[in-house]
Amino acid sequence: MQLQTTHVVTRSTSSTPVIGTRSIRTLRRRQLVVSRATTQTVRRTTKKEAIKDARDEVRELIKGRHCNPILVRVAWHDSGTYDKNISEFPQRGGANGSVRFYPEITHAANAGLPVAVELLKDIADKYDGVSYADLFQMASAQAIELAGGPHIPLRYGRTDTCTEEEVAPEGRLPAGAGPFSEGVTMPGDHLRKVFYRMGFNDQEIVALSGAHTLGRVKKDRSGFGKESTKYTENGPGTPGGTSWTIEWLKFDNSYFKDVKKHDDPDLVVLATDECLFADEGFRPYAEKYAESQDAFFEDYTKAHLKLSELGVKWDPEPIEFDT
């Protein structure tokens, strides 16, 4: 196994997830306990007020740190564990905040995501009425909007999982390329296997794939892409990696245009990207979104909202905002 340095989570004696920066082999002890007891909390009259104030702080965090992509990813990976065939909470997975716990945060598909949990930790500590499940989904929606994408009118009030015994099993998230774990060989079949389990159809799969207009693959996390390209060598944020689009902090329909052209060696096109134009069921939607950003934004908003509520247990009822 290749030695890599990453952010990992280890067990604590209190069943609280512990996050720190260390080498997987040397196990250095620079750790940060993800709990709400380390800082003074700010209490508001209502949960709705707390959510609004937390949302304002999340927006400032994103503007200052250029962390849009990883905040989208942590929310997706939290909700993307949902299995529509399981009725019990939290066994069914979904947007329940479990991605912050060991061992889920150490699953291979979640490499690098402890960074996102650490970014949001101070806000989580400050607003104890806001669940991690809500905070992850909030950060994702705000990251997309601040990058030029559509406004996503999230509802709030998600219940958190409470212990590491409630995490989702490994293997429920999509892979970028084979070999695939479900006994399938074609990337389109793999995407359907994963997303149909969550209750999505072909059109929604393609729309959600368009969020790869944000972000990069990192070779030390996924094994894909280059160490750096002309589009990523100077950041913003941490330099390096390979992006799907030239302006990888801008949310638009460039992903579909660039995947369709597939003519720039400094942009990544994975097997699960390429299949959107090769697969007969996916192609009409990919062509549609390459032609019309408005159509992409409309369909993406609906699919993102659906993703953000997969497996949710409301506490007690959803909280809605006008803006």
Image (tube, rainbow, N blue to C red):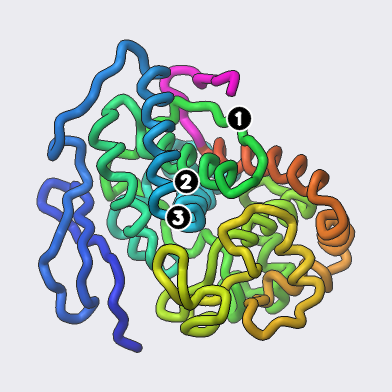
C-alpha gap between disc 2 and disc 1 = 22 Å
Q: Quadrant of the C terminus?
A: top right
How many C-alpha atoms fall within 10 Å of the one at disc 2: few (<14), some, or many (≥20)?
many
Q: Helix or strand or loop: what does disc 3 sit on?
A: loop
In the shown orientation, is residue 205 left or right of residue 51? right
Tell which circle, 3 or 2, labels the residue nearer the N-terminal end.
3
User: Which numbered dot is residue 66?
Assistant: 3
- Residue beneath the point at 70% across and 70% down: 273
Q: Nearer the viewer, residue 311 or 67?
A: 67
Q: Is residue 16 above or below residue 317?
A: below
What residue did someone put label 1 on? 153
What's the residue type where badge 3 is placed?
His
What residue did someone put label 2 on? 93
Q: Which residues are magenta?
A: 312-323
Marks 1, 3: nearer the viewer: 3
Q: Is residue 122 above or below residue 282?
A: above
In this view, the residue farthest toward the front is 234
Tell which circle, 2 or 1, labels the residue nearer the N-terminal end.
2
In the shown orientation, is residue 275 left or right of residue 102? right
In this view, the residue farthest toward the bottom is 2
- Residue beneath the point at 44% across and 55% down: 67
What's the residue type where badge 2 is placed?
Gly
Visible residue check, residue 41 = yes
Q: Is residue 221 above or below residue 319?
A: below
Residue 141, percent across and down?
54, 41
Q: Is residue 241 above or below residue 254?
A: below
How many numbered marks have been drawn onto this rendered protein structure? 3
